[in-house]
Amino acid sequence: MATRKSDRRTASRRFEYIVIECVTPQLDGGRYPVKRVVGDAVWVGADLLKEGHDSPAARVLYQGPGDDEWTAVAMSFDFDSDRWYAAFTVDRIGHWKFTIEAWTDRFGTWRTDLKKKLDAGQEVSLELMEGAMMARSASKSARSSAVRASLLNTAKVLEDRRDTAIEKRVQRALDDDFFALMNEHLKPTDLTRFSRELSITVDRERARFAAWYEMFPRSQTPSDEPPRHGTFVDAAKQLPRIAELGFDVVYLPPIHPVGRTFRKGKNNTLTPEPDDVGSPWAIGNENGGHTAIEPALGTFEDFDHFVETARELGMEVALDYALQCSPDHPWLREHAEWFHIRPDGSIKYAENPPKKYQDIYPLNFWCEDRQNLWNACRDILLFWIGHGISVFRVDNPHTKAFAFWEWVIQEVQREHPDVIFFAEAFTRPKRMNGLAKLGFTMSYTYFTWKNEPWDLEQYLSDLTATPRVEYYRGNFFANTPDILNEYLVDGGRPAFRIRLLLAATLLPLYGIYSGFELCENVPAKPGSEEYLDSEKYQLRPRDYDAPGNINDDVRRLNAVRRAQPALQRYANLFFGTSENPTILVYAKTAADPALEWTSVKPQPVPRELLADLPAPAYSGSDLLMVVTTDPHRVQEAMIHVPIAALGIGADETYAVHDLLTDARYTWRGARNYVRLDPNQQPGHLFAIERMGP
């Protein structure tokens, strides 16, 4: 009988013996890598579907940077969730990949069925013969002569049909060493591999935990000296103070030559004075562009000394990566085609009506000479990496081609996987998510505009208790040169202390812009988020020990952050409730909960599987934070501690030790009393101390 055309198509098709689906972690079907940090355990979950009653088996295959071979780890089955799990630890930075293999566990199924029949008192001679056949098959895969001999000898034992041998045959069939040999050497006949290899970007610890400090080097002159342009030498003298406050990263706005044409004057005026320094984001003049230094700041030798001084103090220097040019940038003369050309032949400047930025020309990332433009932008990064920079704060990435970011981040991290990219993307949430998926290590957030407890809880739940944790890391900057929130203007010094406490304890990444520790809060005009006498347009030397500073708060909080692992983790945040709507209650556990981030909601990994992993390399206390958001009045409340998340019983007595004041209180159960005075103590940072039965 002739074969139909449809039958021929069926015969040529590759069928999968076992369906492998719902694999986690993966992002957008494997289109983008998920993110982890060195030392993290990667939990892999999957659903395995197979017809009939035979048991499947599965393993995770993974490769780290530089590995030529796959490493395998067996998956375990959780009956309650009907799901398979395994875990492995990522021990170095770079690009990792993993996949899953599944097959029918012929020997495991045979062994289970044999036990059932023996328990039921049934005849098992044929089953033992089947076991012998599998043992002989496994012997062919054994490389060791001793293993091969053991398997062949076992086959002979199982084939022995003498009535007196039945007990010996059954005993050997169920021996654990025989089970181990068969698991290792019996080749599956229906091995099925998942259709994709999934990716993981593994970063260094500073990608998830760091305290940032933003400073303008040109303002770092002693406040008691006559006004002058600061240098890297002046700025280096400030580094011990910043390190003593406990910061990890010192971020510098653009340090390049500042454009002269349409230079902005003080308070953003369009009529600058001869001594006005202009906006550092208007990059480029006759002294060079993005790979040059503003001469008034000093030399490359001075810059290198600044970077090395920071490193010796345990800090890194982050540079601003702003892909835009002043009208005087050398690229305007050499590559006018890299910009947006208007019908009259002029080059388009940046504007956000009614605002105009005549001192800044945006680049056209889809120009006809795109490849050379992209290469030049990449080479800027490589140039500064050569000067010891491995952290870049990227200005307005959402206004540049997304394809460019995916390309350039991969280009740089291929050779320099330790480089961190920080997205300054105050834009729509989906754009911010998209940039994180493309490779940005961390991102600014909406934190500065979240000032009510209900709003903070909702926002933090979205950041830390949804699948966004697989790829998006928020950095809670409490202020920036562009953002002086009305809450700080209205609330004064207590508001600064409140926002500092929230920023430093809600997420492991946070930062402040120079002057925050002095509670600077005078806006350019009522309702504006621009600072009066903004440092973006003029020099602003400061006395950092001026009365009213909150240096002690900064110093103490950063010390606690470094001492408490709970404040260094991301997805370990749980909210309690308060009977006073102005008070926020939240807890952070000492270890991340073992969660599998599905597309719907996080699922806990079965507890019995956690024992398969090595103990985490950190310890510490579970923490409870109680913070008022009212900077004007004393607030009291009965609060409800999230005791279930902290493993505290409903009637259990425990101590709470305030790490900010050293005070101790004895509490019981969930409902307890607090009183917060914004002028004295705007919040508690409690370590939970178990008191036993």
Image (cartoon, rainbow, N blue to C red):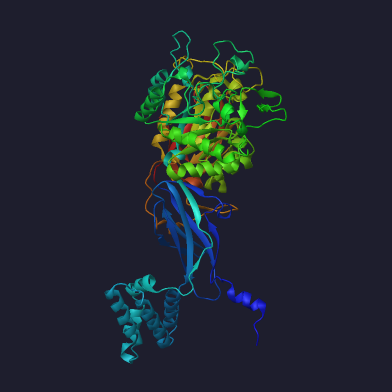
Question: Where does residue 133 sit, x and y in percent of width and height?
Answer: 39, 83
Q: Quadrant of residue 545?
A: top left
Q: Relative to residue 555, is residue 505 depicted above or below?
A: below
Q: Nearer the viewer, residue 356 or 465?
A: 356
Q: Residue 464 versus residue 351: which sits nearer the camera?
A: 351
- Picture residue at 48% right of the left edge, 50% below the top: 200
Q: Position of residue 604 (x, y in %)?
A: 51, 54
Does 246 appear above or below 402? above
Q: Residue furthest right?
A: 343
Which of the image's four quarters has the N terminus? Answer: bottom right
Residue 529, by quadrant, is: top right
Considering every residue shown, the one lying at the far front of the view is 334
Give the side of residue 137 with respect to residue 584, left or right: left
Q: Residue furthest left?
A: 146
Q: Position of residue 248 (x, y in %)?
A: 42, 31
Q: Residue at x 67, y 23 (%)?
A: 356
**Quick one: 632 or 337, which is closer to the camera?**
337
User: Would residue 338 be seen by someone viewing this image from the given angle?
Assistant: yes
Give 438 or 593, whichever is nearer the viewer. 438
Residue 80 can be seen, yes or no: no
In this rendering, the answer to whether 59 lies above or below 234 is below
**On screen, 373 above or below 617?**
above
Number of marks in picture: 0
